[in-house]
Amino acid sequence: MRDWLQSALQPAGPEAARVHALWVFMLWISIIVFVLVLGALAWGTFRRRAPGNVTIGEGSPGERGMKRAVSAAVGATVLVLFAFLVFDFSTGRALTARRTPAVQIEVTGHQWWWEVNYYNAVPNRRVTTANEIHIPVGRPVLIRLNSQDVIHSFWAPDLNGKRDLIPGKESSLWIQADSPGVYHGQCAEFCGYQHAKMAFIVVADRPDDFARWYAAQADTASTPTDSLALRGQEVFLSSPCVMCHSIHGTPAGATLGPDLTHLASRRYIAAGSLPNTRGNLAGWVLDAQGIKPGAKMPPNSLTPADLQALLAYLGTLK
Amino acid sequence: MRQTLRVGLFGAGCVFALGCQRETRRFRESPPAATSETAVTMSELQPGPKARDLPVLNPYERNAYGVSEGERLFSAYNCTGCHSHGGGGIGPALMDDQWIYGSDPENIFATIVEGRPNGMPAFRGKIPNNQVWQLVAYVRSLSGLLPKDIAPARDDHMVAGPEPQRTEPLLPKHAFTPPAAEHP
């Protein structure tokens, strides 16, 4: 299972492979042109001229040679640029070709996190999560991109190129992963103070793993059984958390912040800023502004006992 | 001589601009504790000589970012559901000079935190103090009670009136008392 930082040079899906092929083609053509130009420059600099007067002018033998050389270079340049154009068009057409999507996901950009909604014909089996996108391996996935505030850009370089999220105008992108793994992505359009900490991951699962994950995510959160976590649920419902976050299965239903119904199943918190551990979560709840200044999560003052209870409850949200 | 004066004025302008708190973004601010949040005074008597309550200084009253955050939260926390964008509806209008429960920052803080009869919910424990203060600053800006340079030059919404910076301040009329048992 592969899990490393993003790279466009190690494509993990057919879309990224096409982008990569275009990039390699352009790289090699550019190298050849660069070497030829430098070679011509060196030849012009170091060749020995026959001593005597050099005649330049209409009809002179030197002039005719130069005319031929410049015409050949212009012709070659047009040909090369035309080859780029054709390759570029065919890549673009292949990337946007419509297929039957195995999964349709709506990704909404927020300052500074990603809201992820899975389409389902049955409304109560729709799944809402944040900053973590699961897809089945080897199947085309259609991602529909929207923005809530400013322009963001969705970029998972191992899977496809960038696509901007424009407020009020939906755009779309196809991704497909060839092998199971965790592919990292990043907002690629400057969107404010915490643009750098607006990351996400795409987890490619085997089809049965994906189905199991989806079924678990579509469920509501179960009511905790032990008293500490029950107390934590009360803390959650009576504190500022409930003004912005929702947990399905409880009265908390606000949609300003990420959906926390299955928070404990996610690998990272705060849009890829920190691994999802109990300590990081405690720091984030108490002083999010110290970790991600400017994020919409306010500082919360909780007593130590209430914080422990809250963390125990959040830990049950598998 | 004039040249020196000009350069000096320019320099002084730069220094004053640097000292301006209008655009400062303080993300880790510890908000002032409002006296009204802790307890309600039920007696006129005090130990020692009688002193008036220390007025609370709202740090966001001179900060455009704080006021704009207040505007964002005003919609996010659904204040607009009853007060609209200041014009009122189910709840009283906030952009006029009528203040049923007082127009001072601490009065508005208390109104938000404690709630008021006939429909205003108590947001105690649900909104962190610094966000309440941002809301207070925004609510006061609606009737032009904040310094003009804090108000934005252009409103985010379509409005029929003049832009916020050119809104004439409406001085509060404290004498107003609502008729008992009537919807405010």
Image (cartoon, grey):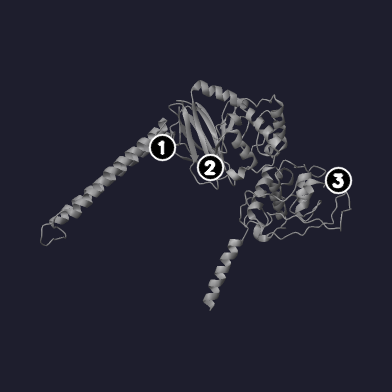
Q: Do the residues at pointers 3 and 2 share their chain?
A: no
Q: Do the residues at pointers 2 and 1 share their chain?
A: yes
Q: Is residue A101 visible?
A: no
Q: Is residue B105 visible?
A: yes
Give neighbour class at mark 3: few <14, some 14-19, many 20+ (Cα, 10 Å): few
Distance Cα–Cα, label 3 vs label 1: 67 Å
Disc 3 residue type (three-letter): Glu
Q: Earlier in the sequence, mark 2 or mark 1?
A: 1
Q: Is residue B117 left or right of residue B74?
A: right
Q: Which is closer to the viewer, label 2 or label 1?
A: 2
Give neighbour class at mark 1: few <14, some 14-19, many 20+ (Cα, 10 Å): some
Which corner quadrant of the image does residue A259 belong to?
A: top right
Distance Cα–Cα, label 3 vs label 2: 51 Å
**Element at badge 1?**
loop
Label 2 sits on residue: A197
The image's mark for residue A8 is: 1
Disc 1 residue type (three-letter): Ala
What chain does mark 2 sit on?
Answer: A
Query: Circles 3 and 1: CB distance less than 8 Å?
Result: no
**Going by the picture, which residue comes out furthest to the top?**
A208
Between A168 and A233, the one nearer to me in the picture:
A233
Query: Circles 2 and 1: CB distance less than 8 Å?
Result: no
Q: Do the residues at pointers 3 and 1 share their chain?
A: no
Distance Cα–Cα, label 2 vs label 1: 20 Å
Q: Which is closer to the viewer, label 3 or label 1?
A: 1
Label 3 sits on residue: B182
Between B126 and A57, the one nearer to me in the picture:
B126
- Image position of B7 with respect to A249: above or below: below
